[in-house]
Amino acid sequence: MTPRSTQLDRHADLLDRAGRYLAGGGLGLFVLPPDVNLVIAEGRGSHVTDASGRDLIDYHLGSGPALLGHAHPEIVEAVQRQVAKGSTYYFLNEPVIRLSERLVEAIPCADQVHFTGSGTEATFFALRLARGATGRQKILKFEGGWHGMHDYALWGTVPSQPSPYPDAAPDSLGIPDALRGQVLVAPLNDAARAAALIDRHAHELAAVIVEPLERVLVPVPGFLETLREATRRHGIVLIFDEVVTGFRIAWGGAQERYGVVPDLATYGKAMSGGFPMAAIAGRADVMRHLDARRVDRAHLVWASGTLNGNPVSAIAGLTALEILARPGAFEHLHRIGGRLRREIAAIGARHGFAVQTPGEDAVFGVRFTDRRPLRTWEDLLTADKDLNLRWSVELIRRGILTNPNEKFYLSLAHSDADVDRTLEACDAAFAAIRR
Ligand SMILES: Cc1ncc(COP(=O)(O)O)c(C=O)c1O
């Protein structure tokens, strides 16, 4: 066995090299604070081990994809079998055909699917498809809604104050000025306001895109129904971004859970069993604009990609869906996640904190705020992010891995023993920040 001091040196060395050679020292927007930053060496079930040999219970799960836990033996085996036969072909292959069939069976709005490489590509192409299908240009999204990193998604995603609706600021530097006014933004969960905006801009709106569970905000009764009615009235494409909710909050995702069926929906994360793949699912009359056999070049929407339909990702997704379809999967997520949500809020209250755990049992947030109910991005702005960061850092020190101020993701691999250990750590972390 490698001595512990050598492992710690190696871990420190890897972090040092990450800081030097990776832009921003990390892989994207989210980088853990330096004192708890870590390099993951291995993931197994609900746990990860870092390069220093430290074990942590993982509630980030690769930002959601590892819904079955890490390195599920059936997925490992299926992927190994496929990869030995080649990892990418571009042309049709059996795993991707079987996965498309499975998705169409499971997803309420789906007559057909189209594969992409990432959730960002899925929403980007879904919006292009909506423009192609309607001949209109603009889109409406909701404040706080996260649809990936492309130029149409990054408006009003994480504003530090409410947006001047329907205008909003771009979230990132480098978004073309030419897009200003192309993306309208409205507050989530205000059905009357959204309907009025849709009516007013109907002649120029191609799509309304919404995360049906927006980060950790559940839709108020009637909100999604109103979007459905208003978009149908005007022939606007309603897109549910189910990259997070798909196959997680129910087998049929948000469409099943909340009982509203859009025209298109985007999938990613859990759908591909922890491998890179995403999809657009939708009604045949909208999807036909992707079909070069049926529409002429002038009516065709392009949405191609070298790795679309990758057989390794497809077999991983197919295996993940087989496992999720077994009896008890969603009950387990509800039971474990529900217990964590209730008890984290109760323990926080015992330590004198106003803590809420909004969301669904399989994916929820911890927010330090006394604003109730939490319905909009503006409501979430009342949460104390510094306190959350300090609490999350205390959790990581105690072997509980979360992404501060983001979400807790649950997996089929999380056990009651994991939850017991997590709640003890939560208790100690609340006590530490109280001091
Ligand atoms: C709801 C939602 N849509 C789209 C995306 C983008 O997916 P990806 O990171 O695969 O590009 C994300 C990513 O977190 C997401 O949460």
Image: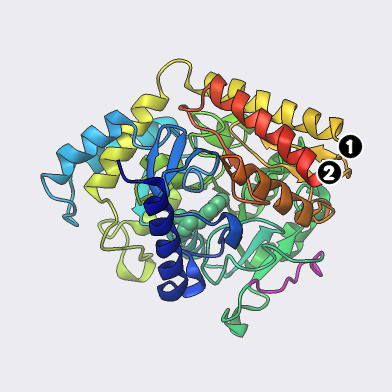
Q: Amino acid at mark 2?
A: Arg
User: Which of the pair 261/156 is nearer the observer?
Assistant: 156
Q: CA distance from mark 1 to mark 2?
A: 8 Å
Q: Up-down: is 216 above or below 325?
A: below
Q: Nearer the viewer, residue 296 or 151?
A: 151
Q: Is residue 301 left or right of residue 210?
A: left
Residue 434: which numbered mark, if any?
2
Do the residues bearing badges 1 and 2 touch, measured as CB atoms within 8 Å? yes
Residue highlighted by disc 1: 352
Task: Residue at 43% x, 31% y: name it.
Answer: 106
In this orientation, which residue lies closer to the viewer: 361 or 223?
361
Task: Say which quadrant the C terminus sits in.
Answer: top right
Q: Main secondary structure of the magenta part?
A: loop
Residue 38 forms part of the magenta stretch: no
Crowd tier of the residue under label 2, counting other residues whose Cα lies within 10 Å: few below 14, some 14–19, many 20 or above = few
Query: Mark 2 falls on what kind of element?
Result: helix
Please state the horizontal and vertical placement of residue 4, each as a whole percent of the image: 40, 46
- Image quadrant where residue 90 sits: bottom left
- Image-quadrant location for residue 94: top left
The first of marks 1 and 2 along the sequence is 1
Q: Is residue 239 visible?
A: no
Q: Which residues are magenta?
A: 162-171
User: x and y percent of residue 171 in the render?
Assistant: 65, 71
What's the residue at 77%, 66% (across, down)? 160
Picture layout, residue 281 above or below residue 138: above
